[in-house]
Amino acid sequence: MSIYTRNYPRSAKLKVLRVIPSMNPVFGGPCQGIRNSVPCMERMGVHTEVVCMDDPSESFLEKDEFTIHALGKSKGVWKYNKRLLPWLVANLQRFDAVIIHGLWIYHSYAVHKAITIVKRKPQPVYVPRVFVMPHGMLDPWFQLAAGRKIKAVRNNFYWSLIEKKIVNDSDAVLFTSDEELKLARKTFRSYRPRKELNAGYGISTPPVFTRSMRETFLENHPRLAGKNYMLYLSRLDVKKGVDVLIRAYKKYKEEHPQFASLVIAGPGLDTPFGKQLQDLAKGNDDIIFTGMLTGNSKWATIYNSEAFILPSHQENFGIAVVEALACNKPVLISRQVNIWKEIIEAGAGFADDVSEEGITRLLRNWDETDGEGKKAMNEHAGLLFNTKYTAESAAKKMLEVMNNVR
């Protein structure tokens, strides 16, 4: 029997706790997914709080209008925080449901441990439903990638010792797409969750593009004035395939000098890999690095682009991909971005292999699409977003999933 067995019902209004290592935007999609989802769920009558291991004085916490319990910075590769477990033990029973965002580090273990401790309290005891949202972290790529052999051995050991209990004891594992759900079954033999559910995912509708937004964009990026460009917008990480993109782009640009420029936007320029990418791009002035973009600067850069490109080796959803769709921009992605089938079916972009040859085909397909074809893809991109990936539709689906798990 699951350690998460509980009594029902407790309250009419659903109260949800989301547990995540950090709400820092530089760490990618999960924290942005929370920011997209929580306001919509609040309008649906769901009260949400977040607990994370960030310094409470961090500026990125200042604009959030929902409750965030920042317990201070974590330590080490496991991201241990001595305050998290006592906080969970003291607060878990205030909530109807807990969502663990991500795996492999201390926060997921702390939730499992806290539930065990709460269960030992004198009866009657209330224990919330517990959901695990892996955000792609159960994808077999992490165990099979050539550069991750040591980490794969570590993950096997950690899975056997701790993580399989967290996953298999949960009330349900929540995925952002059907593809992510199916891939998770291939990674560990002892993967036996009680339920697997596609809870969907979505983003808030972006701001409308304005003249002032364009003017700010041109002030910040004068090199892009009058230029057509493809946009890569994501972390500068080897998982994202951006090094393969640069090599493929340079070769294609040499053969097709009139092809669009390539803008590479995202955090990580000052990392060893980021510096490697800048060295790789040397000799081609049409490859432009901007660093991390936020707010109107980010949206203006998307709106001004021809198309979005993300040749990731592994991507469970791809918030930036959907942000591009929301701006009516076609997307050129790898088949390892788990919503690629939906993109192709909607006629909102192209998908291919994560290789120089595959990316070259993506660039060629776009280059050889005529004006009417590109205009149709723009329309299909916006339609796909509005019918499938809005924050409102994702929040509604998430709420239905949680209410149906008993």
Image: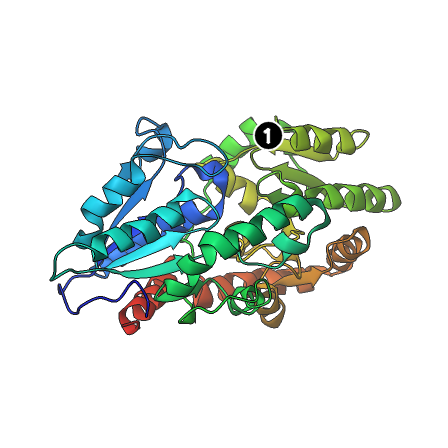
Mark 1 falls on what kind of element? loop
- Residue 257 located left or right of residue 115: right
Q: Position of residue 206 (x, y in %)?
A: 43, 49
In the image, what residue type sits under mark 1? His
Establish if 105 lies above or below 74.
below
Q: Please identify the quarter of the rendering in which residue 150 is found.
A: top right
Is residue 264 visible from the viewing direction of this image?
yes
Q: Position of residue 210 (x, y in %)?
A: 45, 42
Callout 1: 10 Å neighbours few (<14), some, many (20+)? some
Name the residue located 54 percent from the left edge and 54 percent from the top edge: 318
Name the residue located 20 percent from the left edge and 61 percent from the top edge: 14
Q: Residue pushed farthest right?
A: 255
Closer-to-camera residue (287/10)? 10
Q: Position of residue 341 (x, y in %)?
A: 61, 69
- Residue 85 located left or right of residue 379: left
Name the residue located 30 percent from the left edge and 34 percent from the top edge: 71
Q: Which residue is mark 1?
A: 221
Closer-to-camera residue (196/399)? 196
- Residue 319 located left or right of residue 116: right
Q: Quadrant of the C terminus?
A: bottom left
Q: Please identify the quarter of the rendering in which residue 345 is found.
A: bottom right
Establish if 302 lies above or below 40.
above
Q: Please identify the quarter of the rendering in which residue 107 is found.
A: top left
Closer-to-camera residue (152/182)? 152
Q: Quadrant of the N terminus?
A: bottom left
Q: Position of residue 58 (x, y in %)?
A: 35, 28
